[in-house]
Image (cartoon, rainbow, N blue to C red):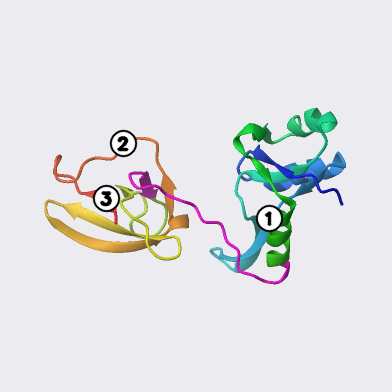
Amino acid sequence: MSERAWHVLHVNANHEKKVAQHLSVRSLEHYLPLYSERSRWSDRSVTLERPLFVGYVFVRCSPQVRLSVITTPGVIRLLDDSIGCEVSCEEIERIREGLASGCLLRPYFDLPVGTPVRVRTGVFAGAEGVVTAIRQRCKVVMTLSSVSQCFALEVGRDDVEVLSGTIPTPGLTGEPGFAML
């Protein structure tokens, strides 16, 4: 095995496995770390293999095949080496060994304070808010504010989606707004 560093491919979200298949067909050395997760569907529970790094696949190749890598269907771009986007062989090997040995590696999505979000599931599905803090294991505490009344609702990171628009300010329009605590 070569000791060249791994490059990071930015790929279309939810297309990581397809990109990995295309790279295999092209005989390009790649790595897509996957973890198993139980998911409850309406009629049953299933075990799904999901990418540890959503939107990314690692590839190790020579400069001569770079064009073949970046023209792979589903690839958005090869992250620029000048900004430290190479991953060492040791880091990739640790991830491989960790997953193989049963370590509970899971994605962690950082939601910076001030990020507008919308609740995707449950009774509060569709309610919007702004992240003000993150607590324990990728969970956030959400506060519904109306005039001066609040209550807390704890939601997981996977239960919210990031918004690009602005969030109404609680109390200014008479409408309740959300803020993440």
Mark 2 is surrounded, within 10 Å at the Cα level, by few (under 14), some (14 to 19) or many (20 or more) other residues, namely few
Residue at far bottom of view:
102
Mark 3 is surrounded, within 10 Å at the Cα level, by few (under 14), some (14 to 19) or many (20 or more) other residues, namely many
Eyeballing the image, is 18 above or below 152? Answer: above
- How many discs appear? 3
Q: Residue at x 49, y 52 (%)?
A: 109
- Residue 47: x and y in percent read 65, 66
Instruction: Give the image quarter of residue 14.
Output: top right
The tag earlier along the polypeptide, 3 or 2, is 2
Eyeballing the image, is 33 above or below 97? Answer: above
Can residue 134 be seen at all in this image of the molecule? yes
Instruction: Decide if residue 64 is on the left or right side of residue 172.
Output: right
The tag earlier along the polypeptide, 3 or 1, is 1
Q: CA distance from mark 3 to mark 2?
A: 12 Å
What amino acid type is highlighted by mark number 2?
Answer: Thr
What amino acid type is highlighted by mark number 3?
Answer: Phe
**Where does the magenta region start and end?**
100-118
Q: Residue at x 61, y 51 (%)?
A: 53
Q: Nearer the viewer, mark 1 or mark 2?
A: 1
Callout 3–callout 2 Cβ contact below 8 Å: no
Can residue 15 be seen at all in this image of the molecule? no
* Picture disc at residue 166: 2
- Residue 143: x and y in percent read 26, 57
* Picture disc at residue 178: 3
Q: Mark 1 sits on what residue?
A: 91
Mark 1 is surrounded, within 10 Å at the Cα level, by few (under 14), some (14 to 19) or many (20 or more) other residues, namely few
What amino acid type is highlighted by mark number 1?
Answer: Glu
